[in-house]
Image: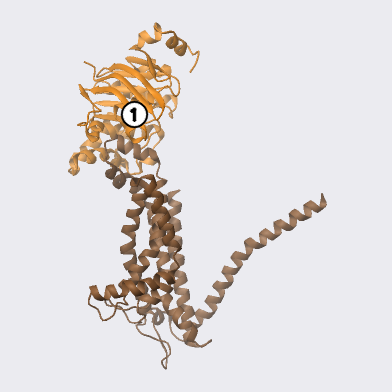
Chain colours: A orange, B brown
């Protein structure tokens, strides 16, 4: 059974039909890329999984999204618990204007109330190690996170999520503000994290999708046109529109 | 062509003069204040002026110690800050983060209206409502106390605090909020742990400017604090502030007398305090950018 399954998922922003009957399964311990031209609904789809669209007024959703078999739109689903399980990395790295240390323990504190200092220290060390920032930053954990480089900020945002121990990582164009070297290193990190998480990445960059993902979905005008193994999508697309997009005829 | 150039030249110079004039007038005022005020130090030393415990300007010889007045201003200001800062910041949080659009509009209009009430009107209302209430609640011989002044001034500081703090909260990048929500933080956790720290310098500036407003306020305090120039032992006794002293006594001070110079010297003290507060607030505001 896939980790995340959508059934007949539709979404409207007021009168605008942003997602149309999306059916897809996202496997655990794999990276799934969602590609498509701007405005095709790929970020919207991603934001359904942790219900970030709830913040926008006038949103209406139909259909189901099952995570581990339970529907996230169920009245019993607690947003806090959902977001503990499904973390998100944003397009622009958005560390809080706090110290590096405080950024990482933010989520831990939010979900566990008062936590002993040594537990927090441990969480900071582990999560910074898992994004390969520990050696660089261990001596200046009390420095403001806003002074880090863009790549370090994005890694810190990933570390901040990992500290909460989620199952799913949603990444909304996580490399779009980074240079090619930094992008390559973040992609390397994603491959490492794959063993422990279900990763869904939205990207503009088809090469990136081809490089890192196991599965790929192609979206156009709110519809999921094609979904399958990444090699299949990129070498033998079944739909004409997918082929046009990946060969660069539009987008 | 020539006419146009001449016209341009004249207009430019006129505007330049306007610009210089404002600085020039401030300088003149400051010089006058210094000239008249510093003369008092020929009669009393600065330390016995600032630290002297009795203010009897028309006794013979005059006793010109303004410590009771400084403490009077301080206690009224402190009281006003204790009341207005939590309510003002709370109101700013509500307007910026929680209130639905319609309530937000109503509240903002209400706050602006509060700022538009002349201080003498507020003082008058305070005198007939607040003063008897304070008297009855605390069983005091008189309701004209520092506390009444604090409560009244808190209302005056509130609009400044609310509007600047609300601005500071509003300009916190939306990405911080999204980040906190995405980590599963509740709305309050997001406000408390992310929004407030991010807006802290703007909020501090708001508090400083609110306090600046309180220290400089004259009319309402003069009407409801009782105007007795003794060192206050608690917040429930009549006090006299620096501003009220100048306003109340300037009319009866003989020009060129010690009393007259002493009132100008009080003006200098007030000027220094307000200047320090404004500079601090400015520092906080610039730190934000």
At x 74% / y 58%, what residue is drawn?
A: B10
A5 lies above or below B36: above
Q: Which residue is mark 1?
A: A60
Side (left or right) of B45 relative to A159: right
Q: In this rendering, is residue B276 above or below A12?
A: below
Q: Quadrant of residue B64?
A: bottom left
Label 1: few (<14), some (14–19) or many (≥20) C-alpha neighbours in 10 Å: some
Q: Nearer the viewer, residue A232 or B156?
A: B156
Image quadrant in which the N terminus of chain A is located: top left
The relative height of residue A238 versus residue B147 in the rendered view (above or below) is above
Seen in the picture, residue B265 relative to B177 is either above or below; the reply is below
Label 1: chain letter: A
- Indicate the position of residue B256 as horizontal and vertical percent values: 53, 87
Q: Nearer the viewer, residue B158 or A30?
A: B158
| Mark 1: secondary structure | strand
Q: Is residue A65 visible?
A: yes
Residue drawn 45% across the image and 20% down it:
A37
Is residue B234 visible in the rendered image? The answer is no
Q: Position of residue B95 (x, y in %)?
A: 37, 50
Residue A201, image quadrant: top left
């Amino acid at each position: 059974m896939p980790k995340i399954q959508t059934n007949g998922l539709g979404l409207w922003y007021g009168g605008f039909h942003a997602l149309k009957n999306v059916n897809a399964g996202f496997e655990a311990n794999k990276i799934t890329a969602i590609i498509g031209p701007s405005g095709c609904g790929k970020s919207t789809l991603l934001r359904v999984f942790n219900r970030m669209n709830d913040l926008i007024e006038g949103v209406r959703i139909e259909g189901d999204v099952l995570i581990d078999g339970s529907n996230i739109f169920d009245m019993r689903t607690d947003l806090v618990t959902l977001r503990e399980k499904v973390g998100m990395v944003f397009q622009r790295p958005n560390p809080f204007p706090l110290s590096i240390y405080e950024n990482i323990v933010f989520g831990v504190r939010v979900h566990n109330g008062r936590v002993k200092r040594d537990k927090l220290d441990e969480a900071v060390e582990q999560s910074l190690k898992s994004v390969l920032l520990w050696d660089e930053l261990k001596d200046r954990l009390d420095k403001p996170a806003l002074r880090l480089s863009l790549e370090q900020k994005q890694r810190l945002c990933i570390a901040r999520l990992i500290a909460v121990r989620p199952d799913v990582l949603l990444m909304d164009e996580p490399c779009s503000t980074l240079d090619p070297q930094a992008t390559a290193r973040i992609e390397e990190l994603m491959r490492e994290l794959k063993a422990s998480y279900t990763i869904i990445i939205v990207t503009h960059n088809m090469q990136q999708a081809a490089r890192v993902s196991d599965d790929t979905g192609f979206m156009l005008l709110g519809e999921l046109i094609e979904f399958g193994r990444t090699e299949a999508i990129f070498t033998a697309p079944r739909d004409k529109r997918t082929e046009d997009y990946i060969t660069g005829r539009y987008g | 062509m020539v006419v146009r150039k001449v016209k341009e030249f004249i207009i430019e110079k006129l505007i330049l003069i306007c610009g210089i004039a404002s600085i020039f007038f401030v300088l003149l005022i400051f010089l006058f204040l210094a000239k008249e005020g510093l003369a008092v130090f020929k009669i009393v030393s600065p330390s016995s002026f600032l630290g002297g415990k009795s203010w009897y300007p028309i006794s013979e010889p005059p006793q010109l110690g303004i410590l009771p007045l400084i403490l009077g201003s301080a206690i009224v200001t402190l009281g006003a800050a204790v009341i207005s800062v939590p309510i003002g910041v709370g109101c700013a949080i509500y307007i910026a983060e929680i209130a639905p659009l319609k309530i937000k509009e109503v509240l903002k209009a209400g706050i602006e209206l509060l700022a538009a009430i002349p201080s003498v009107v507020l003082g008058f209302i305070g005198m007939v409502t607040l003063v008897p209430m304070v008297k009855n609640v605390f069983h005091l011989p008189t309701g004209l106390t520092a506390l009444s002044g604090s409560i009244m001034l808190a209302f005056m500081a509130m609009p400044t605090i609310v509007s600047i703090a609300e601005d500071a909260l509003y300009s916190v990048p939306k990405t911080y909020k999204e980040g906190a929500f995405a980590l599963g933080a509740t709305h309050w956790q997001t406000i408390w742990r992310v929004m407030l720290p991010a807006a802290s310098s703007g909020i501090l500036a708001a508090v400083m400017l609110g306090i600046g407003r309180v220290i400089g306020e004259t009319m309402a305090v003069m009407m409801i604090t009782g105007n007795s120039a003794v060192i206050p032992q608690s917040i429930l006794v009549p006090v006299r502030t620096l501003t009220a002293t100048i306003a109340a006594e300037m009319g009866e001070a003989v020009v060129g007398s010690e009393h007259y110079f002493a009132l100008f010297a009080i003006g200098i003290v007030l000027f220094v305090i307000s200047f320090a507060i404004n500079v601090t607030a400015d520092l906080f505001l610039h730190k934000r950018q």
